[in-house]
Amino acid sequence: MRRVIGWVGQKLSATIVLVTAILTATGPAAADKRVALVIGNSIHERAPLLDEPAADARLLAERLARLGFTLSGGTAQIDLGKTGFDRAIAEFKGRIADADIALIYYAGYGLNLNGTNYLVPVDAAPAKASDADTELRSLDAVLRELDGSPRRQNVVILDAFRSNPFEARGIAGLAAGLAPMQVPASTLLAFAAQPGRSGRHGKDNHGVYATALADALQQPGRRLIEPLIEAGIATRRATDRAQNPVVMFTPIDGETALNQAAEKAPGAASP
């Protein structure tokens, strides 16, 4: 009898170990690693001040933190000069080495010089075309920092469609807005407006696009591209089609979600 009881006990213990191993192997997967760099440049030293970018950056940083993103720098990066911009990009590059999603949101001035795109630090003061690479920040160079892991999905959101703050300087070839460009591998690139067009002011010191994007990010279960498409549609409606955002991308994982909260029907039982 004791042998039987001992044998049953051994089998029961083995079964418990086996079930535990199966549950461990088939349980919820570890959350993916998400890192976001959010920049809003409003108070410029040698260019007209902008109301929205800092407020928009703080709004989007708060939304992204709710979605499980680690904010590079700990919070929205506000009013970055040339040195601060470079430091923020370098820190972000270090953080995304093993990330599953890397996201950049930039709000501020965006310019193009004969078709080459630049973002504008708050201490920029170009006097001639040859100053662009030292005074401004090349968008192509920023995107190159996203090169790395082939499994990482990159999202770059450019809310940078405002007037040319250096127009009075008469710099040949320097124009407002961002020009069309190639999209890097595994990257989703969103523009707040059509190339060469300016964005619209919204309510509460926010841009129309930033408000629409923040609202779209709150919707659960949306795949990587869906909130950006929804934000674009909402922006177009809110501006009576005057501002038309653009979304471009190279092949990405269509199942990746920005907001992973599962949609649940009212009264549905939890699994």
Image (tube, rainbow, N blue to C red):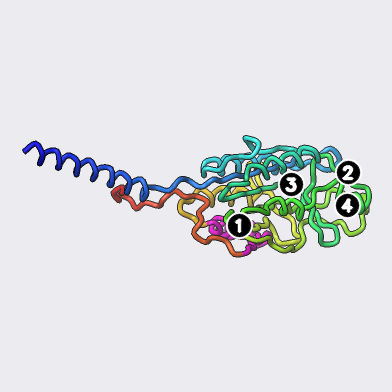
Residue furthest out toward the front: 3
**Mark 1 is on which residue type?**
Pro
Which SS class for mark 3? loop
Query: What whole-number distance in Å separates the C-alpha atoms at marks 3 and 4?
Result: 16 Å
Which of pointers 4 and 2 lies earlier in the amino acid sequence? Answer: 2
SS type, badge 1:
loop
Q: Which mark is residue 150?
A: 1
**Label drawn at residue 167:** 4
Quadrant occupied by the N terminus: top left
Q: Which residues are magenta?
A: 224-250
> Quick check: is 246 in the magenta stretch?
yes
Q: Could you say whether the residue bearing mark 4 is in a helix, strand or loop?
A: helix
Crowdedness near tag 1: few (<14), some (14–19) or many (≥20) residues, C-alpha within 10 Å: few
Amino acid type of disc 4? Glu
Q: Earlier in the sequence, mark 3 or mark 4?
A: 3
Magenta-span inclusion, residue 9: no
Mark 2 lies on a secondary structure that is: loop
Residue 67 spot, x, y in % from top left = 52, 44
Looking at the image, is mark 1 or mark 2 earlier in the sequence? 2
